[in-house]
Image (cartoon, helix red, strand yellow):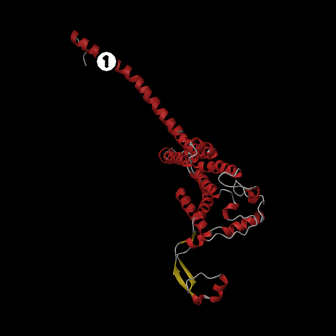
Amino acid sequence: WPPPTRPKEKRLFARLAEMTLLGRRLLHPLRRSAGMSSSSALAAEAAPPSALRWAVLPWSFFIGENVLLSHNRASIIALCGGDEQSYHALYNALSTAACASLGFGYFFRVAGAPPLRHVSVAAVGGSFVLQAVGLAGLFQALPRVQLPLASEPAHGERAEPAAASEAGAAARQWVIRCPMDFKGESASPAVTSPDGLHGLHRVSRHPMLWSLAAVGLGGALAVPSAPQAVWLLGPAAMALLGGAHIDYRHRRGEGGTLSAETERVTSLIPFAAMAASAQAEGALGSLQALARELKVENAVLGVLLAARWAVTRGR
């Protein structure tokens, strides 16, 4: 490329050189900022603060509004002019908003958080144990599960065990029945304990809360990211704080009762009263009584579901 010789060409090339230099000066800070933004993005991807906030704040809102509104129930009703319907409307509106924030936070903020660790086989095993216990407890709230095909007395009525053994196999027939025993649910369970305890209430005064907490704790062991683990710890926080507040209100006769004797033979923390031999049957006897009083078929379904989840995580 020969250098320009005419004045007009010299002026044109000089302007092109100035424009090129000006363009470089303008693009240089943009390139630096682009480099900084990419590094900032990598740092944000490694530890997203927004995901952690969405893991903590919705649970704080949910637990806080439940505790505060129930604790100050009388004062809030007085502020509403003595109208309990207005109190329930406020309570339900805030609870709905809290549940919506929990769902939005998990599915749209927390579930997409990047993984931070490899989930080991031991973590999956611990997750299975916790979730099997939790699901077995939750499934106790369902009607008793039964086989849809069974052999019953020929007259179609349920017979006593002694009468059934005397009648023998000749007087029986195969029948199809509902997989859930709704008829058995209509009868109150026979309470044989001197303490008046039955089933999961031997384990804790709040068995469903702690069953859900066990499912969450098991899930927290088997997820690869910190925001998901923190979110799944929420049910345990609810069981501990919410259960303690329910006990506090029941001691004062608000929303229920908790006598000194019932408090002595039961516990907030699962299995604490049983381990301390506070119940009439002692530690081993209360555990055996619990095994007799549980809906075994329902518990087996819970364990199978937990095993299915563990196999899925192990792949």
**Could you tell me if residue 6 is visible in this image?**
no
Per the image, label 1 sits on a secondary structure element best described as helix
Q: Position of residue 11 (x, y in %)?
A: 25, 11
Along the viewing direction, whichever of 144 and 129 lies nearer the viewer: 144
Instruction: Answer with left or right where residue 201 lies relative to residue 131.
Output: right
Q: Give me the residue at 74% from left, 67% from top.
A: 193
Circle 1: is it few (<14), some (14-19), or many (20+) Cα within 10 Å?
few
Q: Give me the residue at 62% from left, 82% from top.
A: 159
Q: Quadrant of residue 167?
A: bottom right
Quadrant where the N terminus is found in the figure: top left
Q: Is residue 39 above or below residue 154?
A: above
Q: Position of residue 279 (x, y in %)?
A: 76, 62
Q: Quadrant of residue 197?
A: bottom right
Q: What residue is disc 1 on? A: 19
Q: Is residue 45 above or below residue 170?
A: above
Q: Give me the residue at 62% from left, 71% from top.
A: 187
Q: Position of residue 40 (x, y in %)?
A: 49, 33
Q: Position of residue 244 (x, y in %)?
A: 68, 49
Q: Is residue 80 above or below residue 277?
A: above
- The amino acid pointed to by label 1 is Met
Q: Across the whole image, how many numbered discs are drawn on residues?
A: 1
Q: Quadrant of residue 305?
A: bottom right
**Could you tell me if residue 297 is visible in this image?**
yes
Instruction: Answer with left or right where residue 48 lies relative to residue 291.
Output: left
Q: Residue furthest bottom?
A: 170
Along the viewing direction, whichever of 207 and 7 lies nearer the viewer: 207
Q: Residue furthest top?
A: 7
Along the viewing direction, whichever of 187 and 139 lies nearer the viewer: 187
